[in-house]
Image (spheres, rainbow, N blue to C red):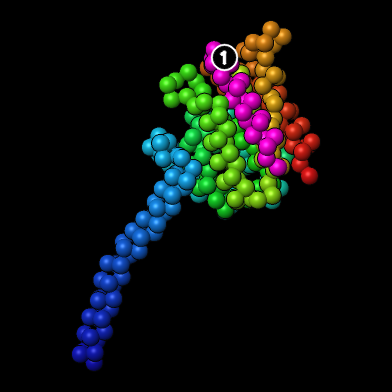
Amino acid sequence: MNFFNTMNSSIGAMVLLITVALVPSVFGQEKTANENNSLQFYAKHDLTKYALEAAKWDKDVAKLAATNSTEGGEDFILCIGSSSFRLWDTIAEDMAPYKIVRRAYGGAKYCDLAIHSPQLINGLRFRAAMIFIGNDITGKETDKTPEEVARLAKIVMDSVRKQRPDSPVFLIAVTPSPSRFQHWPRIKLANQSLEKLAGSEANTFFVASQNKYLNLQGEPRPELFVKDMLHQNKEGYAIWSSVLKDSLKKNLR
C-alpha cells in the first residue's frame, strides 16, 4: 500500500508540474493569436500609425467590454463614441422611451475608436447604433482631414455591421462648440464628409444636429454648454436628445 501510495503521489505531482508548465504556453499562444489578429486588422485598415496612441484607452475599453454579455438587448440603442455620450448622466430619461447602452470614453477620436470598436461591442446586443466623435479636428498637428474622418468612421460602421448586420447606423454631426469654433470651417467639412458617407451606405443616416447650436448670426450658443465651452449642459442635452429621437423615430423600422 505504501508503495502504491507513493507512486500515486509521484504521478500526481508530475501531472501538476506538467499542467503548470503548459498553462503559460497555452495563454501565451492565445495572446499571440490575438496580437496577430490585431496586427492584421491594423494593416488591413491602415490603422497601424494610430495603434500606439490608441493603446492609452485599453483599460477603459476592457472595462466597458467586460459587461457586453450582461448589458444591452434587442431593443437597445447603442451610443458609441466620446465624452458627450460618457458624461450624459441623464441619458436614460432624456432618450426615453428608447433604451440606451453606452460604449464611450473621454477624448475618443475616430482613429482610436476604429481600433477599439470591435472589442467594445463584441457580444453586445443592440437594435441600432448612434456614433458621435468630436475630437479629430481640434487645431493640432495631428488633426485628421475631413476625408480621413469619414474613412475612419466607415471602419467603425463596418465593426458595428459585423456584430449586427441589419443594425441601422446613425452618424451624428460634430457639434459647433465655442471652445473650438475657430476650427469650425474644417469641422464643418468633416460633417459634410460624414453626411456623404451616410448617403452612400444602406441603412445609414446622418443626424444634422449642428445648426441647433448656432444662433442667427451663425455663432455657437454658449448658454448650451458647461464652463469648458466644449461639453453640453442640461439645456444642450435636451436639444440633442430631441434631435436624436426624431431621427430614430423617422428611420427605425
Say which quadrant the C terminus sits in: top right
State the residue position of label 1. 181
Q: Is the magenta stretch mostly helix, strand or loop?
A: helix
Q: Is residue 28 left or right of residue 89?
A: left
Q: Where is residue 153 in the image (x, y as percent from the top left)?
A: 57, 36
Vertical placement of residue 236 versus 32, above or below: above
Q: Which amino acid does label 1 sit on?
A: Phe
The residue positioned 58% from the left and 28% from the top of the image is 84
Q: Residue at x 74, y 33 (%)?
A: 247
Disc 1 residue crowd, few under 14, some 14–19, many 20+, Cα 10 Å? some
Percent of width and height locating residue 195: 66, 30
Say whether residue 74 is left or right of residue 231: right
Identify the residue at image location x=49%, y=29%. 107
* Closer to us: 30 or 161: 161
Q: Where is residue 201 in the image (x, y as percent from the top left)?
A: 67, 40
Q: Is residue 63 visible?
A: no
Q: How many labels does the image show?
A: 1
Q: Which residue is drawn at 59% across and 25% down?
A: 190
Secondary structure beneath dot 1 equals: helix
Q: Which segment is the magenta one?
A: 177-202
Magenta run includes residue 100? no
**Residue closest to the eye, 99 or 133:** 133
Q: Which residue lies furthest to the bottom in this view?
A: 1
**Magenta span contains residue 193:** yes
Residue reaching furthest top? 217
Q: Is residue 170 left or right of residue 46?
A: right
**Percent from the top left, x then y, of residue 73?**
66, 50
Q: In which quarter of the image is the N terminus?
A: bottom left
Left or right, residue 24 beside residue 206: left
| 245 versus 126 height, above or below | above
Does the rendering let one see residue 139?
A: yes
